[in-house]
């Protein structure tokens, strides 16, 4: 892996980390607001609810990420099939054009000689 690829991967990793941290921070604010409005909770209950919510958010985020990754793989596979068909058609067309040119050149050379 060259430096450019490493830098691109590093930037992607940083972007993913920042996205996850923003998501977790927003989830913490939401659940803290919820537990603050809920009367009668002990500190342990608040912590349990907050931890459960954060764990649930992490689980949902992982499911969504896995779904997106699976979909990307499906779309990439479909794209590869289309590209292979296009390349095969292009190759066949190039072979037919080349054969037609050879026949034309042969006919021209025959008519001269």
Image (tube, rainbow, N blue to C red):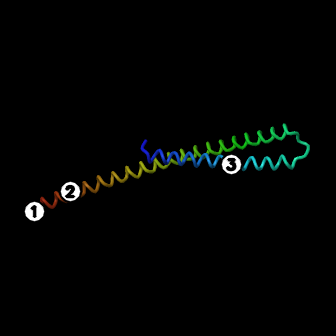
Judge left or right: residue 14 versus residue 24: left
Q: Residue at x 62, y 48 (%)?
A: 18
Which residue is label 3 attached to? 23
Earlier sequence position, callout 3 versus callout 2: 3
Q: Residue 14: where, in percent of width, then height? A: 57, 47
Residue 96, given in percent of the width and then of the height, sits at: 29, 54
Quadrant of image for the C terminus: bottom left
**Tag on residue 65?**
none
Residue appearing at x 82%, y 48% in the figure: 34
Name the residue: 58% across, 49% down: 15
Q: Position of residue 17 (x, y in %)?
A: 61, 45
Q: Earlier in the sequence, mark 1 or mark 3?
A: 3
Q: Secondary structure at mark 2?
A: helix
Where disc 3 sits, the SS reads helix
Residue occupied by mark 2: 103
Mark 1 or mark 2, earlier in chain: 2
Frontmost of labels 1 and 3 is 3
100 left or right of 44 in image: left
Which is in the foreground here, disc 3 or disc 2?
3
Estimate the spatial distance between the alpha carbons at disc 1 and disc 3, rounded to whole Å: 78 Å
Residue most extreme to the right: 40
């Amino acid at each position: 892996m060259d430096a450019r690829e490493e830098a691109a991967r590093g930037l992607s990793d940083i972007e993913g980390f920042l996205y996850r941290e923003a998501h977790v921070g927003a989830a913490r604010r939401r659940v803290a607001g919820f537990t603050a409005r809920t009367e009668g909770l002990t500190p342990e209950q608040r912590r349990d609810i907050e931890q459960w919510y954060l764990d649930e958010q992490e689980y949902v985020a992982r499911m969504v990420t896995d779904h997106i990754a699976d979909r990307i793989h499906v779309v990439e596979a479909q794209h590869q099939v289309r590209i292979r068909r296009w390349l095969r058609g292009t190759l066949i067309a190039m072979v037919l054009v080349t054969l037609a040119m050879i026949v034309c050149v042969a006919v021209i050379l025959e008519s001269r000689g």
